[in-house]
Amino acid sequence: MQARTRKWALAATVGALMLSIAQPGRAAEDLEGSKDHPMLTRFAGAWINAYSVQDYDEAQMPNQAIVDHENIKVMPLEGKVTRIGYRIDGGKSALEVYRNYTAALKDGGFQTLFTCKNDEQCGGEFQSYVLNGDKVRPGGAGDAVFGGNYYAILAKKAAPAGDVYVFLDIMHDDSNNITPVFQQVVETRPMQQGQVKVLDASAMQQALDQSGKVAIYGVYFDTDKAGIKRESKDALDQMGKLLKGNPKLKVYVVGHTDNQGTLAHNKTLSQQRADAVVRALTDEYHIDGKRLEAYGVASLAPVASNDSDRGRGQNRRVELVKE
């Protein structure tokens, strides 16, 4: 049997699509805090073992066979992303589950964009990408999945507030006698703007005078990356102005993350991000490097709860701390 490591992360939709085969009975306890998406219920007897909802995120939707892992072509989408990992008792085949989902999607007004079965239709690289590719399934709990038929479907429904896409990956795990289902739903919509205000240099100075530190939310990085994005220029401009206007000011540049991922990984990532800000201030704004010292503290100094998207967003920040 070919072993595949399944990294569960899930996405859900809007509306009220109910699977005709759904029943209230559950074979095991759902993951705490998880629930079915209101638009697409579970297969009879399924239970949730992984769950994630992001109010606004990016998602990659496989919409064609994947035959070259180095040159993968998928559909990139942005909007509300819900990802759910279900397990179903292995007495239900992947085909039975797949047929029920496709029928329910059709009845709910969804148009099928892509469907495939096993390597001969999906492509030899399809499962390894869907199961292990961070772009499709970022983070989450894992299952070791051994062999069996698998099916995939991507469907779309037009809606006034934004089109809704559902991707399903269904596989029978012969070795463990379960049928896992990965469900990712994207409700496309514009991102809410104006949630972050860039402090000007005078406001930064005031915060340093009052509390000895200032949180900067206008420095942006891609997920799990340390390269500063171009949209960070306004914040960096104000940081440079602050430091140039106060030539005796020395600060620690401190990187903070949320608690997603391991502490060790986030410690490294936050240090790399703090280092990147110091480099930008020295290279682009000609601030003396002796006035800046970078530290990464990962998720060790949260300012909000990491139990919500909003709280995690507040915790991801760069701070200037007066020496």
Image (cartoon, rainbow, N blue to C red):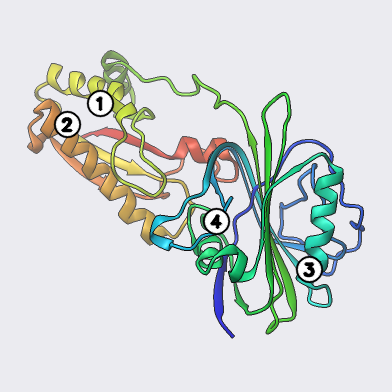
Q: Which sits earlier in the primary sequence, circle 3 or circle 1?
A: 3
Q: Element type at marker 1?
A: helix
- Residue to which mark 2 is pinned: 281
For discs 4 and 3, the disc positioned in front in the rendered view:
3
Rendering coords of residue 250 (x, y %): 15, 32
Q: How many numbered circles does the render carry?
A: 4
CB under 8 Å between discs 1 and 2? yes
Which residue carries the number 1 mark? Answer: 236
Alpha carbon separation for disc pair 3 and 1: 54 Å
Instruction: Look at 51% across and 60% down and name the residue there.
Output: 66
Give the side of residue 5 with respect to residue 103, left or right. Answer: left
- Residue 37: percent from the left, percent from the top? 76, 46
Query: Which SS class for mark 2?
Result: helix
Q: Nearer the viewer, residue 109 or 81?
A: 109
- Are there few (<14), some (14-19), or many (20+) residues within 10 Å of tag 1? many
- Please say if 301 is above or below 126: above
- Using the numbered discs, state the Cα–Cα distance from disc 2 to disc 3 in whole angstroms: 57 Å
Which mark is first along the chain, 2 or 1? 1
Secondary structure under tag 4 reads loop
Which image quadrant for residue 148? bottom right
Give coordinates of residue 76: x percent, y percent: 52, 42
Query: Residue at position x 32%, y 16% from top?
Result: 203
Q: Mark 4 highlights which residue? A: 137
Closest to the camera, between mark 3 and mark 1, is 3
Instruction: Assess whether mark 3 and mark 2 are in contact (beta carbons under 8 angstroms).
Output: no
* Residue 293 visible here: yes
Residue 183 visible, this angle = no
Residue that mark 3 sits on: 95
